[in-house]
């Protein structure tokens, strides 16, 4: 079916068939897509809403279906009506979204169950070891220069980035990076001396 866009009247959409509008859309007339959307947008939305039961997801899917129609142009008028094509595509994509939602929900449920399991209490040996390590780190921190210690404490205890530390202390970022690097090297050296 060869349609010349100049010969087809877009002024009277009631007289144009879906195939004619699809052909116009295929040659780049966005107004034809608008007419098809006006014709079938509510059908696609209602079906998507019925399956997904979420208005926002149904709106998103409706937009996705018509965007797909515009970009991929996979509809073939010889294989059936446009309404059948759109409902089949909508149903298929909606079911895919339900499956995806189900998979995400199962993952979140498994994750929350893992997080809900209680962490077993520390054994006396683990508590003593943790306490010893804590003392080693405090002693090692006390031995490094004040500026380096301050940067490391702000990074690890306050969770600040080096840029945030620089802004908070009104010190150039390069200086903060140097102090951080030197502090970590000194801390490592001090911990090796304390443990080894």
Image (cartoon, rainbow, N blue to C red):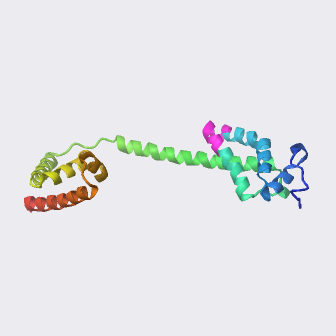
Q: Main secondary structure of the magenta part?
A: helix
- Residue at image position (14%, 52%) is 137
Find residue 1 and report its horizontal and vertical position in percent.
Answer: 89, 60
- Residue at image position (8%, 61%) is 193
Reply yes or no: does residue 14 show up in magenta.
Answer: no
Residue 25 lies left or right of residue 119; in this view the side is right
Residue 38 lies left or right of residue 102; in this view the side is right
Q: Is residue 43 above or below residue 177?
A: above
Find residue 121 and report its horizontal and vertical position in percent.
Answer: 22, 42
Residue 82 lies left or right of residue 143; in this view the side is right
Q: Of residues 183 and 64, which is closer to you in this image?
A: 183
Q: Of residues 191 and 102, which is closer to you in this image?
A: 191
The quarter of the image holding the C terminus is bottom left
When asked about the image quadrant of residue 184, the answer is bottom left
- Residue at image position (88%, 56%) is 6
Total of numbered circles in the picture? Answer: 0
Residue 54 lies left or right of residue 126; in this view the side is right
Reply yes or no: does residue 55 show up in magenta.
Answer: yes
Q: Is residue 61 above or below residue 7?
A: above
Find residue 181 and report its horizontal and vertical position in percent.
Answer: 22, 60
- Residue 53 visible? The answer is no
> What is the magenta range?
49-60
Q: Of residues 23 and 12, which is closer to you in this image?
A: 12
- Residue 7 visible? The answer is yes
Find residue 32 and report its horizontal and vertical position in percent.
Answer: 80, 50
């Amino acid at each position: 079916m060869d349609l010349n866009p100049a010969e087809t009247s877009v002024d009277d959409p009631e007289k144009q068939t879906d195939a004619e509008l699809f052909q116009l859309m295929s040659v780049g007339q966005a107004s034809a897509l608008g007419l098809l959307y006006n014709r079938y947008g509510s059908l696609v939305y209602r079906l998507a809403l019925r399956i997904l039961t979420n208005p926002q997801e149904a709106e998103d899917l409706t937009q996705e279906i018509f965007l797909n129609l515009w970009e991929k142009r996979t509809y073939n008028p010889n294989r059936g009506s446009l309404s059948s094509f759109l409902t089949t595509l909508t149903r298929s994509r909606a079911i895919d979204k339900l499956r995806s939602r189900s998979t995400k929900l199962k993952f979140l449920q498994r994750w929350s169950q893992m997080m809900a399991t209680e962490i077993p209490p520390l054994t006396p040996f683990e508590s003593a070891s943790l306490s010893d390590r804590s003392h080693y780190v405090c002693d090692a921190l006390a031995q490094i220069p004040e500026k380096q210690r301050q940067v490391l404490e702000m990074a690890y205890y306050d969770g600040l980035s080096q840029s945030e530390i620089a802004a908070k202390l009104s010190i150039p970022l390069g200086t903060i990076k140097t102090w951080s690097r030197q502090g970590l090297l000194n801390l490592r050296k001090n911990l090796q001396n304390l443990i080894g």
